[in-house]
Image (cartoon, helix red, strand yellow):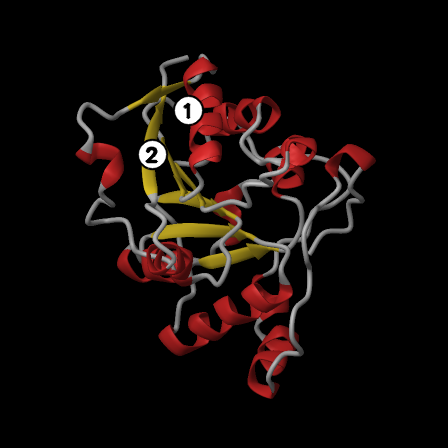
Amino acid sequence: MTDAGAPENRRVYGRRRGRPLRQGRQRLTETLLPRVAITLGDEGRLDPSSLFADSASAVWLEIGFGGGEHLADQAETHPDIGFIGCEVFENGIARLVGEMERRALGNIRVFADDARLLLDRLPPSSIGRVFILFPDPWPKQRHHKRRLIARETLDGLATIMPPGAELRLATDDRDYLVWMLEHMTAHPGFAWTARRPADWRERPPDWPPTRYEDKARAAGRVPVFLRFVRRPC
């Protein structure tokens, strides 16, 4: 958690709490979560590699991890990588810490606040890969300003990602897909890697599925998977 207050233009939209937590998950939020939670001080940079007791070969970031299944799968597959997950929904955080205990995952840290606060404190070129999967599309036009994929966020990501680092996006909302492509291709810091339709219509083998993808397919919506790389500075 963080003791740095978010200014008005950093208001977090959406729910923070759903159904009451089951007893086991409530216990983990009181015992395990404090040990893996990221706390920001009042000032200064946060060295992400310092968050992990074992030396991590790289640090990857997932913004809005939902139920945490993708993050947990990635952490289990890459035990040498340190992972930071950002999420404000308490039930999703509780689900993730449950997976961390069940799989004995020690390479995940959690930031339970607006991810942009964390981006502001990370050093340049410190994050090797970023995932933003199925973010809230905020379909009403008056709510478009709430969308996470925006110039401010992309500027922050471009700063913390070194050349060649990968940004992965996914959505099942056609309007948000157009928005993502417009903003991503207009940003000088990122290049789209797609060369053929399968590059964005099919989820790569090293990209674990999420429950949001399953829900989209069950509802007849087609998910899209976008990969961008940080251009040379």
Q: What residue sits 71% from the left and 46% below the top? A: 12
Q: Nearer the viewer, residue 164 or 225?
A: 225
Which residue bears the numbered disc 2?
A: 226
Q: Quadrant of the C terminus?
A: top left
What is the x, y in percent for residue 52?
A: 47, 55
Cα gap from disc 2 to disc 1, whole angstroms = 9 Å
Q: What residue sits 42% from the left and 57% below the top? A: 212
Element assignment for label 1: helix
Q: Quadrant of the N terminus?
A: bottom right
Q: What residue sits 41% from the left and 24% below the top? A: 181
Q: Nearer the viewer, residue 223 or 5?
A: 223
| Precedes in sequence: disc 2 or disc 1 | 1
**Pointer 2 with pointer 1, Cβ within 8 A:** yes
Label ID, residue 181: 1
Label ID, residue 199: none
Amino acid type at circle 2 is: Leu
